[in-house]
């Protein structure tokens, strides 16, 4: 699974990355994490508000920082 954190590197982006890593770990997902900080690349995903969470090239969240539990709920259906 490829997970991307979209954002300029702000505190919200850091918190989203932590939550995503914790969720992946708790679900036992082998994932690679990538930070996307270039605004042109971020906008190419169609989001206008950061941070954003992209899983296997599909935007699953943008504009807010979820808890690790909420990220688990987003990732669980994608595992398989």
Image (cartoon, helix red, strand yellow):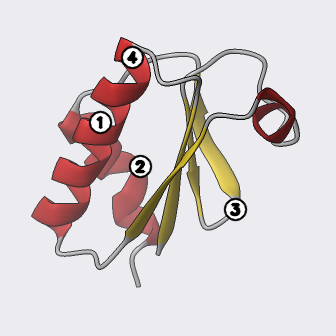
Which label's residue is closer to the chain start, 3 or 4?
4
Count neighbours of disc 4 (C-alpha within 10 A) and say few if under 14, some if 14 to 19, many if 20 or more: some
- Specify whether 72 is left or right of 36: left
Q: Mark 4 points at which residue?
A: 12
CB under 8 Å between discs 3 and 1: no
3D distance between C-alphas at marks 1 and 2:
6 Å
Count neighbours of disc 1 (C-alpha within 10 A) and say few if under 14, some if 14 to 19, many if 20 or more: few
Q: Percent from the top left, x then y, of residue 67?
A: 24, 28
Count neighbours of disc 2 (C-alpha within 10 A) and say few if under 14, some if 14 to 19, many if 20 or more: some
Q: Nearer the viewer, residue 46 or 43?
A: 43
CB under 8 Å between discs 1 and 2: yes
- Specify whether 45 is left or right of 3: right
3D distance between C-alphas at marks 3 and 1:
19 Å
For the C terminus, the quadrant is bottom left
Please give the label number shown on residue 57.
3
Q: Nearer the viewer, residue 35 or 80?
A: 35
3D distance between C-alphas at marks 3 and 2:
14 Å
3D distance between C-alphas at marks 3 and 4:
21 Å
Closer to the observer: label 3 or label 2?
A: 3
Q: In this view, does 64 lie above or below 46?
A: above
Closer to the observer: label 4 or label 2?
A: 4
Q: Name the residue under label 2.
A: 74
Residue 47 lies in what quarter of the image? top right
Closer to the observer: label 3 or label 1?
A: 3
Q: Name the residue under label 1.
A: 70
For mark 1, give the secondary structure: helix
Label total for image: 4
Which label's residue is closer to the chain start, 3 or 1?
3
Count neighbours of disc 3 (C-alpha within 10 A) and say few if under 14, some if 14 to 19, many if 20 or more: few
Residue 66 lies in what quarter of the image? top left
3D distance between C-alphas at marks 4 and 2:
18 Å
């Amino acid at each position: 699974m490829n997970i991307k954190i979209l954002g300029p590197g702000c505190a919200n982006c850091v918190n989203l990355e932590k939550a995503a890593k914790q969720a992946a770990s708790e679900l036992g997902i082998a994932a690679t994490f990538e930070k996307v900080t270039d605004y042109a690349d971020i906008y190419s995903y169609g989001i206008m508000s950061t941070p954003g969470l992209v899983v296997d090239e599909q935007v699953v969240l943008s504009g807010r920082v979820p808890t690790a539990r909420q990220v688990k709920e987003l990732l669980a259906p994608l595992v398989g």
